[in-house]
């Protein structure tokens, strides 16, 4: 299967690599990229149990994703009601990537600005090349982060810091992003994909049901009070009690051998 704006490669170890492929337009979210992302995540990978972890990156060394394609957008000025309705598609797409039941790692290989930063915020883990620049720069164009940035960034780095970055539109260096907790690792560009793939393979080797329920429990708990979060944690743990992978994990431990998890 092929897409106009994406490259897709599923490795034998269960790691899927999704590459935003509009390098001539800084991998911006134009053309058919949003429908392509929806099709790949929701129709292809979601239904393929061989996919255990996803690495999302950009083609080339200049950009992970520079956000909206301004050349496309400049000539388009929808009425507010029309924009309000259409933006629901983007929100649903990004939420679908954020809630994708298997882990997503963003390998930020260059600039991640505006919608590109918002896309990276949907990943579970972010790793950046030390040359990357990251920011929600929409205010400089007279608009605001409208693909989830006003909601996800404060939850990640705190309200005051997020407001400062969005009010000013300032770009962060990779080192600053690491200090704020926006990314988890910063590495030289030549090491970026190896670092992301090594982590993805480690995750992919773990029992898929456990990893999925961990992700869901964390996400659910962040939206509610701790008591409701603990209730979901208890539910998730109970759902794993009769899984084949739990039996395999215990048997492998007792037999002192590596486990083979099958996601059942």
Image (cartoon, helix red, strand yellow):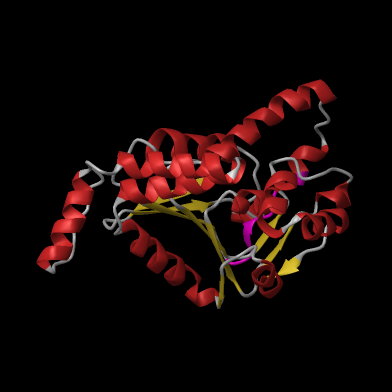
Residue at 55%, 76% in the rendered image: 187
Q: Is residue 166 visible?
A: yes
Identity of the residue drawn at 69% across and 42% down? 148
Is 64 in the magenta? Answer: yes
Q: Nearer the viewer, residue 157 or 71?
A: 157
Image location of residue 225, percent across then percent down: 60, 42
On the picture, is 148 further left or further right than 257? right
Q: Position of residue 63 (x, y in %)?
A: 63, 61
Is 70 drawn above or below residue 170 in the view shown?
above
Tell me which residue sits at (28%, 46%) in the image.
50
Frontmost residue, 106 versus 181: 181
Quadrant of the image for the N terminus? top left
Give, as a single range, the part of the protein colored magenta. Answer: 61-70
User: x, y percentage for residue 219?
Assistant: 53, 45
Left or right of 198 on screen, residue 247:
left
Depth order, front residue of 230/112: 230
Q: Quadrant of residue 68?
A: top right
Q: How many marks?
A: 0
Q: Residue 109: percent from the left, percent from the top?
A: 58, 65
Question: In terms of depth relative to the viewer, which is nearer, 159 or 22?
Answer: 159
The quarter of the displayed image where residue 234 is located: top left
Left or right: 1, with 252 as reference point: right
The relative height of residue 185 versus residue 16 in the rendered view (above or below) is below
Does residue 51 show up?
Answer: no
Look at the picture and state if 190 lies above or below 73: below
């Amino acid at each position: 299967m092929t897409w106009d704006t994406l490259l897709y490669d599923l490795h034998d170890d269960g790691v899927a690599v999704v590459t935003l492929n509009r390098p001539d337009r800084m991998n911006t979210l134009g053309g058919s990229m949003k429908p392509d992302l929806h099709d790949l995540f929701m129709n292809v990978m979601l239904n393929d149990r061989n996919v255990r972890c996803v690495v999302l990156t950009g083609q080339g060394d200049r950009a992970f994703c520079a956000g909206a394609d301004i050349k496309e957008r400049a000539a388009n000025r929808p009425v507010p009601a029309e924009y309000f309705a259409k933006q629901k598609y983007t929100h649903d797409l990004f939420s679908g990537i954020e809630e994708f039941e298997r882990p997503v790692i963003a390998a930020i290989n260059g600039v991640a600005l505006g919608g590109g930063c918002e896309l990276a915020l949907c990943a579970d883990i972010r790793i950046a090349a030390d040359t990357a620049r990251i920011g929600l720069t929409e205010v400089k164009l007279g608009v605001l982060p409208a693909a989830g940035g006003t909601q996800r960034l404060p939850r990640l780095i705190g309200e005051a810091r997020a407001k400062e970055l969005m009010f000013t539109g300032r770009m962060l260096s990779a080192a600053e992003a690491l200090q704020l907790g926006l990314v988890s690792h910063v590495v030289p560009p030549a090491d970026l994909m190896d670092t992301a793939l090594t982590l993805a393979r480690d995750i992919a080797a773990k029992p898929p049901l456990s990893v999925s329920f961990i992700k869901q429990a964390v996400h659910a708990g962040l939206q509610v009070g701790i008591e409701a979060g603990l209730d979901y944690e208890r539910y998730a743990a109970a759902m794993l009690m009769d899984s084949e992978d739990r039996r395999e994990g215990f048997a492998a431990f007792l037999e002192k051998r590596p486990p083979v998890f099958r996601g059942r």
